[in-house]
Image (spheres, rainbow, N blue to C red):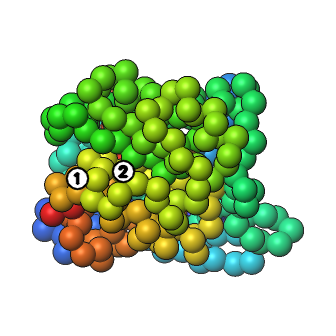
Amino acid sequence: MDVILFGLPQGVFYLNVGIPGFPCPVQILGRKILSDFWIQNKIPELYCSFISADMLLGLFVDQRVTEDKVIVHYYPFDNSEKLYLMAQVMDSSFGLPELVFPYPLLRQTTHEELCSPPQGWEVDDAFDVMLGCGEERIREYTIKFMESVQVQRARLYDPACSTGVYLSTLKKAFPDSYTIGQDLSRQMADVSRQRVDEVHCGNAMEPKIEAGSADFCFVRFLNSDVVKSSEAEALLTALLPTVKKGGYVIIFGHTPVLLSSANYRALPEFEVIQCIASAVDNSGIFQYYVLKKV
């Protein structure tokens, strides 16, 4: 059994997998390496939500949390075991596997969670490109998922649409769809108007679309470095009514999601369809929660 000390615990994650014959999920310990997008100077966050096989460490045993570090005990995997486990996860051999990032990003001086400015971010051309590149893998998978559920003339709602790149990518893939964006930042909303069919400026706590009118609600901001954990559940609750029966709420982001399936399974009228997605090139996995209104 090995032990590891994490001075930056926001890099710790657990891959929960259901094993036949076990009454509860088995926890696999992992450690994020620096994001490839950060290394390429494309995004400012050290860690993104993308997980590859080499980030898996071993079978979780126990942990201790102190004021300045997290101490974790685990049984280590060799490289062949890591590759095998990842292949099984991507092949859906473990039911509903889930990635959980239990430690949010904190300010070193105050230990408060980092989050976006109260009025949203200001954007320039470089910031616009940065926001888009962090979600490249997620956009590719979303197109694949939407093709699989075959919703015709879908209404796509993004309550934190940023500069509209995400919705415009989906519009190109599904020309008969209707895209509706909303953002807290007036500047972001203005920029997105050139890319989105309908745009509103406002807080996601007050959705600007009619209740029960969206086929898809894409929740891309309940994430580390964007909102605080204490706000995430209230924001999701405010957005759930926007989706029609048979519609989908999809939760993800290029930084770790602050909620988990335990939150989603407690929601009335919603079924958890999946918790992760695989990159289209099978290079790894990322959080991708799909909730279907039943």
Counting residues from the start of the chain, the first of labels 1 and 2 encountered is: 2
What's the residue at 64%, 36% (across, down)?
Answer: 190
Q: Amino acid at mark 2?
A: Cys
For the residues labelled 1 and 2, the Cα–Cα distance comes to 8 Å
124 up-or-down from 256: above or below: above
Q: Secondary structure at mark 1?
A: strand
Residue 203 lies, with reference to residue 188, above or below; the image says: below
Q: Nearer the viewer, residue 88 or 75?
A: 88
Checking the image for residue 217, the label placed there is 2
Amino acid type shown at disc 1: Gly
Query: Which residue is under mark 1?
Result: 247
Whether pointer 1 and pointer 2 mark residues with C-beta atoms closer than 8 Å, the reply is yes
Horizontal side of residue 46 vs 274, given as left or right: right
Q: In which quarter of the view is residue 229 placed?
A: bottom right
Q: Quadrant of residue 114?
A: bottom right
| Residue 127 picture location, percent across and down | 71, 32
> Which residue is at the front of the view, 207 or 265?
207
- In the image, which disc is placed on residue 66? none
